[in-house]
Image (spheres, rainbow, N blue to C red):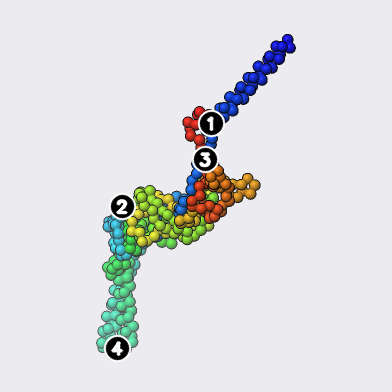
Amino acid sequence: MKKAVTIGILVFIAVTFVGALYYLYQKNQEDPTVYETESPSEQTIVKKTVATGKIVPKEEVLIKPNISGIIDEIYIEAGDRVKAGDLIAKIRVIPNVSSLQSAKDNVATAKINLDNQKKSFQRQKELFDKGVISANDFDSAEVTFKRAEQNYRSAQQNYEIVRTGTTSGLGSAANTLIRSTVEGMVLDVPVKTGNQVIESNNFNDGTTIATLADVNEMIFEGKVDESEVGKIKENLPLEVTVGAIENKSFDAVLDYIAPKGVEENGAIQFEIKGTLNKSDTTFIRAGLSANASIILAKAENVLAIKEALVQFDDETEQPYVEVETGDQEFNRKDIELGISDGINVEVKSGVEKNDKIKVWNQIKPAMDIAQN
C-alpha cells in the first residue's frame, strides 16, 4: 500500500514537471511584442466647429402696392435684374362704390359753385368796366372765381383717382404703375395676372408683388448648438461649403451671434450670420443649403503628432510620449501640447522631428488574434 502511494506521488511530480517544461517551451516559441513607431511631422492644424444653414441675401426688399386692385400686367419674372425705377407691374383699380359716389357728388357740387361764381364774376366785370365798383372789389371777385375753378379741377382729379387709381398730370407718381425701388435681382414674384392685391398702409402690410435683393451681397445664415456657442465669437473666419457647388469653399466672417437661443427638437440653437467675401464672383442662388466651418484656432506649419500616440500620467495627468532610444527600447518624455483637430495635435515642446514615438496602443492583426 505504501509502495503504491509512493509510485503515485512520483508519477504526479513527473507529469507536473513535464507540463511545466512544455509550457515554458511554448512561451519561448511565441513572437515577442514588436512596437511600431511614428515620427512627428509639420502640419497645419485647424480647430473648428460646424454650423448648418443656408445662403441668403444680406437684404431683401419687398415691393408692395400703395393702392388696392387687381394685377393687370406683370413685366418681370424671377431671375431678372432690374434697376431702381424699372416698371414691375400694373394694377387695375376696382373702386369702392361709396367712395366713388362721394367723389362724384363732390364734382357736381364744385360745378354748381363754379357756375355761380362765374356769373358773379361776369357781373362784377361789367360793373368794373363802367367804373361803378373799385378795383379791389373786382380783384376779390376774380380770386373767388379762380378758386372755384381750382376746386372743380381738384374734384374731377379726385374722382378719376378713385375710379381708376390715377389721373392726368401725376406722371411717374401714378400709383397704378408699380416700380422697383432698388437695383438688384428679382428673387420671387408671388402674384400672377388677375390676382387681387391690398395696399400697404398703417394697418396692413399689403400684398408683396416682388422680392428683390442684391445677390452680390450674400450671407450665411445658420444655427449652432448651445454646447458650441460658448467657443465662438464675432469676427472669426468661416469656411462655407455649398452642397450644390462641388469642390469649392467660400470665405466669410462671422458677424452676428444671437443673444437668445431657440429650442428646436429638444436642443437650444443659436442663430449666427456670416458675410461672404465680395471678391468671389461665383453666383450663389439664394436659399441653397450650406455648412460653415467656424475656425476657432489655427496653427500653420507646426510640429504635430497623432493624438493616439499621447499618453497621460495616472497621477499628474500630464501628457507624455515614449521615444525610441534603441532596438525596441523606449524612454518617457513629457511634452507640451497645443491645439488639436481631433486627429492630430500640436506639440510645442518635448520631442524633435526625427524622434521615433512608440505606438503604445497598436491593435494586433486579426490573424494573430484568431491564432491566440
Q: Name the residue under label 4.
A: 132
Foreground tag (2 vs 3) = 3
Question: What's the distance in space between the residues labelled 4 and 2, CA to CA?
Answer: 68 Å
Sequence-first disc among 2 and 3? 3
Q: Which of marks 4 and 1 is nearer the N terminus?
A: 1
What label does residue 30 carry, if any?
1
Q: Which amino acid does label 2 sit on?
A: Lys
Mark found first going from the N terminus, 4 or 3: 3
Label 1 residue SS: loop
For the N terminus, the quadrant is top right
Image location (x, y in percent) of residue 223: 47, 52
The amino acid beneath tag 1 is: Glu
Image location of residue 277, percent across then percent down = 39, 60
Q: Observer-nearest residue: 227 or 347? A: 347
Instruction: Compare marks 2 and 1 and give the one earlier in the sequence.
Output: 1
Q: Which mark is residue 192?
A: 2
The amino acid on which the numbered mark 4 sits, given as a three-letter code, is Val
**Which numbered disc, 1 or 3, marks the residue closer to the eye?**
1
